[in-house]
Image (cartoon, rainbow, N blue to C red):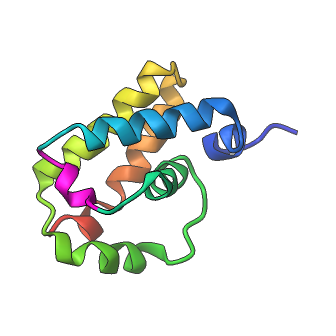
């Protein structure tokens, strides 16, 4: 039986670990957005990547909104963070159709994150 989501295909693999670590390093080294993640460890980035790949998020969109309200994230910052994820997926040669899914998933929570 074929696994249905990118998350299900990659969870627990070395490739998933590499994607999460690369994404984490990209954000932490980008001074235009890294302060938004002050105090966040790689586990937080793992949750972002997992959600974007189709993992369930128990708190839903309202939980996403509540956890980002205090950050005053701009559309430009949101896009920068998203682009780091997309570039990371491209670096590891994730299928174009799967990247499209991730983009749709990320853009579906834009309004909950951007102030």
Q: Nearer the viewer, residue 87 or 61?
A: 87
The residue that appears at 49% across and 40% down in the rendered structure is 20
Residue 78, compared with residue 57, is above or below; it is above
> Residue 106 location, x and y as percent?
37, 51
> Residue 65 location, x and y as percent?
31, 75
Q: Nearer the viewer, residue 80 or 6?
A: 80
The quarter of the picture where residue 71 lies is bottom left
Q: Which residues are magenta?
A: 32-38
Q: Is residue 79 toward the left or the right of residue 61 in the image?
A: left
In the rendered image, which quarter contains the N terminus? top right
Q: Is residue 108 toward the left or the right of residue 18 in the image?
A: left
Q: Given the current orientation, which residue lies at the most extreme right position?
A: 1
Q: Can residue 34 be found in the magenta stretch?
A: yes
Q: Can residue 103 be found in the magenta stretch?
A: no
Residue 20, compared with residue 71, is above or below; it is above
The residue that appears at 11% across and 48% down in the rendered structure is 76
> Residue 47 location, x and y as percent?
51, 57
Q: Nearer the viewer, residue 115 or 44?
A: 44
The residue that appears at 40% across and 29% down in the rendered structure is 88
In the rendered image, which quarter contains the C terminus? bottom left
Q: Is residue 113 toward the left or the right of residue 18 in the image?
A: left
The quarter of the picture where residue 70 lies is bottom left
């Amino acid at each position: 039986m074929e696994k249905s989501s990118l998350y299900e295909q990659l969870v627990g693999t070395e490739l998933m670990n590499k994607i999460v670590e690369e994404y984490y390093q990209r954000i932490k080294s980008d001074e235009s957005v890294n302060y938004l993640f002050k105090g966040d460890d790689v586990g937080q980035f793992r949750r972002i990547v997992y959600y974007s790949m189709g993992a369930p998020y128990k708190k839903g969109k309202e939980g996403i909104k509540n956890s980002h309200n205090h950050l005053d994230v701009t559309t430009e910052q949101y896009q920068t963070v998203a682009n780091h994820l997309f570039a990371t997926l491209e670096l590891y040669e994730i299928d174009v159709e799967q990247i499209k899914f991730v983009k749709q998933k990320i853009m579906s929570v834009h309004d909950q994150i951007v102030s």
